[in-house]
Image: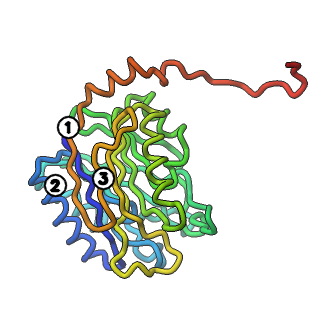
Amino acid sequence: MRVATAQISSGHDVGRNLATIREAARAAAGQGAELVVFPEAAMYAFGAPLAPVAEPLDGPFATSVQSLARELGLTIVAGMFTPAPDGRVFNTLVALAPDSVTRYDKVHLFDAFGSRESDTVAPGEARQVVRVGAATVGLATCYDVRFPTLFVENAAEGAQVSVVCASWAAGPGKVEQWELLVRARALDSTTYVVACDQAVPPDRHRGSAPTGVGHSMVVSPYGEVLGRSGEGDDVLVVDLDLGEVERARESLPVLRNRRDLSAGSANAHS
């Protein structure tokens, strides 16, 4: 399976972002990719009100990207914002194949490091896996990467590949945390992890909004980095051997060996 991460820096012009997505997807398709992964907020960057630009899945953004997927004969995963019933938005990943649309609404909201994503974003309530060719792919967004259970449960449902789309907030040690977390989730779940972050914005100054640090990467089920990008726009193409997932799960059977433990009694004696 050939996959690509399309590391871009989206802005606050949906039409311009769509043009960037088209260019990057065509470059990936030209190298034979069957799955192209764009960042979180590929439709519209953080740092401006989200509700006015949120669209349903039959709106112009998702339908345009699906038309592109149909033209190129591949699956595109990209981050967008969809309306939530309470006036907030959902932080949505769409997996757009030529003949299907799958959504995942971000479950774990970034109420951390002084940010309050939940003020404007409503949480999703369910995991999501999707078929891409011969592979089962689990979907995750940014802050989700700090929660191992999501990845393990997707793997237990059959996921061989985990996609992480991010708009990672900059800060001291954040690039190192990004790589550590992506590699750890590969080991936790014995999946390939295809992790695409926003590129560093050209002006590097967008206030406190999480607008990306780059360093997209593809990691093996053993936690080995198979390819990585730098800070700028980049299309990274990597071949995945899905048989390696099964071999990893035989030699490192963490899914089979895991146990559900109840809390111990406070009065237990050692």
| Residue 44 coordinates in the image, percent (x, y) | 37, 71
Q: Nearer the viewer, mark 1 or mark 3?
A: 3
Q: Nearer the viewer, residue 11 or 188?
A: 188
| Residue 15 coordinates in the image, percent (x, y) | 25, 76
- The three-letter amino acid code for the residue at tag 1 is Met
Disc 3 is placed on an element classified as: strand
Q: Report the coloring of the rendering.
A: rainbow
Sequence-first tag of 2 and 3: 2
Residue designated by label 3: 228
| Residue at screen point 48% across, 78% down | 49
Q: Nearer the viewer, residue 193 or 92?
A: 193
Q: Classify residue 82 by image quadrant.
A: bottom left
Q: Are marks 2 and 3 in contact (CB under 8 Å)?
A: no
**Could you classify mark 2 by the number of other residues whose Cα lies within 10 Å: few (under 14), some (14-19), or many (20 or more)?**
many
| Residue at screen point 46% across, 59% down | 175
What distance separates the C-alpha of mark 2 from that of mark 1?
13 Å
What distance separates the C-alpha of mark 1 from that of mark 3?
17 Å
Q: Nearer the viewer, residue 93 or 256?
A: 256
- The three-letter amino acid code for the residue at tag 2 is Ala
In the visual, does 107 lie left or right of 66? right
User: Is 108 situated above or below 52?
Assistant: above
In the visual, does 243 lie left or right of 93? left
Residue designated by label 1: 1
Residue designated by label 2: 28
